[in-house]
Amino acid sequence: MKRTTKLYNVIFPIWFLLFFPPVILITLVGNYIIDSLVIIACFFVYKLADLEFDLKTLYKKSILKVWLYGFLADIIGGAILFLLGICGDNFGLSYELTSAICYDPFSHPLAVAIIIGAILVSAVFIFLFNYKFVFKNQIQEKMLRYKIALTLAIVTAPWTFLLPTKWLY
């Protein structure tokens, strides 16, 4: 008798979801859309067409790098918050503060300041990655490259860090 039923990944480790939550897919798609919109907006706001730039070429050469570097910058900022949330007592942070960082930043004023600090760290990395790597060969004019990298850093910074995660529980 021939078996027709195949079982794939029967022993999928459920703990893997702790490191790769399903929400990550939504975040990746959302970041890609926002990065795309900001690149397109920068093209028109900074009148790159007048400087002989082509939107399609600029977009195709930059979107993947902007997206990946942006996600890396978000991970750096998130890692700061993660370490403070997990190891906060080692740094002398109170339980109330670490709890506020992890679940409800607006319940403690210092938690808001720390989270804004992490957002700023991410924004600085977004700026540096875009200025020094993504647009370095595409946009030779430094001031224009500076404006585009700064716009991307401000608009695409991980502002969602400020959202209370207690809303999700």
Image: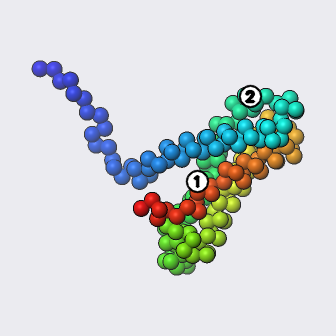
Packing grade of label 2 (10 A; few <14, some 14-19, many >=20) is: few
- Quadrant where the N terminus is found in the figure: top left
Identity of the residue furthest to the top in this view: 1
**Left or right relative to 59: residue 82:** left
**Left or right relative to 60: residue 162:** left
Q: Is residue 126 above or below residue 110?
A: above
Q: Which amino acid does label 1 sit on?
A: Ile
Residue 60 location, x and y as percent? 69, 30
Residue 38 location, x and y as percent? 71, 43
User: Which picture quadrant has residue 84?
Assistant: bottom right
The residue identified by callout 2 is 57
Identified at 72% across, 53% down, the residue is 154
Dot 2: what SS?
Answer: helix
The residue identified by callout 1 is 75
Q: Which of marks 2 and 1 is in front?
A: 2
Q: Which of 136 and 36 is in front in this view?
A: 36
Q: What residue type is labelled 2?
A: Thr
User: Which picture quadrant has residue 44?
Assistant: top right
Identified at 60% across, 47% down, the residue is 71
Residue 24 location, x and y as percent? 49, 47
Mark with earlier residue (2, 1): 2
